[in-house]
Image (spheres, rainbow, N blue to C red):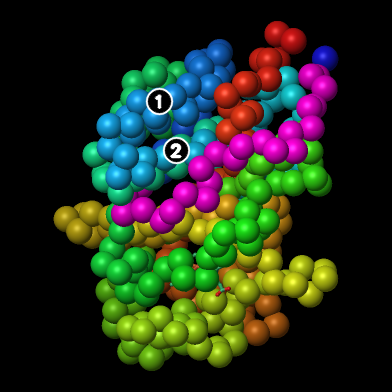
Amino acid sequence: MTTEPQPARDAEPQPVLGPLTTAAIFLVVSVGPGYEERARDVLGDLAALCRSFGFGAPDGALSCVAGIGSDAWDRLFDYPRPAGLHPFRPLEGARHTAVATPGDLLFHIRATRFDLCFGLAAEIMHRLRDAVTVEDEVQGFRYLDARDLLGFVDGTANPVGAAARRDVLIGAEDPAHAGGSYVIVQKYLHDLDAWNALPVETQERIIGRTKLTNIELEEQGSHVDLNTVTGPDGKEQDIVRDNMPFGSPGQGEFGTYFIGYARRPDVIEHMLRNMFLGNEDARYDRILDFSTAVTGTLFHVPSGDFLDDLPPAPGKA
Ligand code: HEM
């Protein structure tokens, strides 16, 4: 029997709208069969763990957001599914592909100090070690003045304040999950030699902003243009991104970890369709000629209150 949803009108969100930080760890794991209770324990303890590590370093702004994948939901909770939760939908464009990759839990750990991210990730993994398969772990860093490794300032157009809360947090449309959100992650690997061989003006037309001064350009079919999407009411629909560069110069690896939060996943999916399948202005986003998506997963982000007081496990109601 599924637990009756309680309207959670004033539910406290997880720290989805935390400030952009200088360090992050993105950890995606799959929960082994029979280890659901262990996963629930870690989810229920997450806020306390974060406080333990962060309390002694208040300037470190340590935070962690947990996401739950579509396949994991019914294994972990006897509670109605969030309306927008489904597996990531892969996209096969004429030139480029958005792959779907597995993941039951996402931990998005942020701080102004990498050691705090590391400590918290280590503690989470200590508790989950034999219970999960690690699908992906990426250590991201702030690069120069918040630039991606393509050399452009990344994150400028993010909504802030009340607008961000409206764009990102579930409200009355799904009362059982109010205060929650959705997040899509994709790990992109760049061909930086090819990118850096382009004249800066060409790069700017591909991105849709000037490189040095970060001024938006009127450029149809640019990355910015393809990701400026409107809803049926003609109003612009925004998401909150917290992309991070990552890489290993010794291995020749240079990447961007894309992470986008939204109140409804179809807003991010609309952007992805424009990028990979194109629209009337462009066959596809030319950023993809230099950036390969090697992962793609969608998660529901429950509210903080949901995690603090988890609904029963299936069969335990
Ligand atoms: C290779 C991966 C990516 C890189 C390097 C990248 C980089 C950038 C840069 C430099 C900007 C302009 C500055 C800003 O407003 O942040 C931008 C804007 C944006 N990007 Fe991306 N991005 C990537 C992937 C994505 C993906 C996968 C999505 C969505 C599914 C996305 C959505 C957006 C949006 C919504 C904007 C703002 C558009 C506006 O001005 O309204 N990006 N991105």
Q: Is residue 74 above or below residue 139?
A: above
Residue contact at pointers 2 and 1, CB within 8 angstroms:
yes
Q: Nearer the viewer, residue 17 or 200?
A: 17
Q: Is mark 1 within 8 Å of ligand 1?
A: no
Image quarter where the C terminus lies is: top right
> Residue at left 51%, top 43%?
15
Quadrant for residue 130, please give it.
top left
Q: Give the image location of residue 108, x and y in percent.
A: 45, 42
Check disc 1 and give the amino acid type. Leu
Q: Nearer the viewer, residue 59 or 41?
A: 59
Q: Answer left or right for 95 relative to 235.
A: left
Residue 33 pos. (x, y %)? 56, 17
The residue at label 2 has a CB less than 8 Å from ligand 1: no
For the question of whether residue 268 can be seen, the reply is: no
Q: Which residue, given by chain and number where applicable, does mark 1 sit on?
A: 49
Residue 246: quarter of image: bottom left
In this picture, residue 301 sits left or right of residue 250: right
72 or 317, which lies in front?
317
Q: Residue at x 39, y 19 (%)?
A: 127
Q: Which residue is mark 2?
A: 64
Bounds of the magenta segment: 2-25
Residue located at (58% from left, 52% from top): 261
* Residue 96 x %, y %: 54, 66
Q: Magenta stretch: residue 250 in it?
A: no
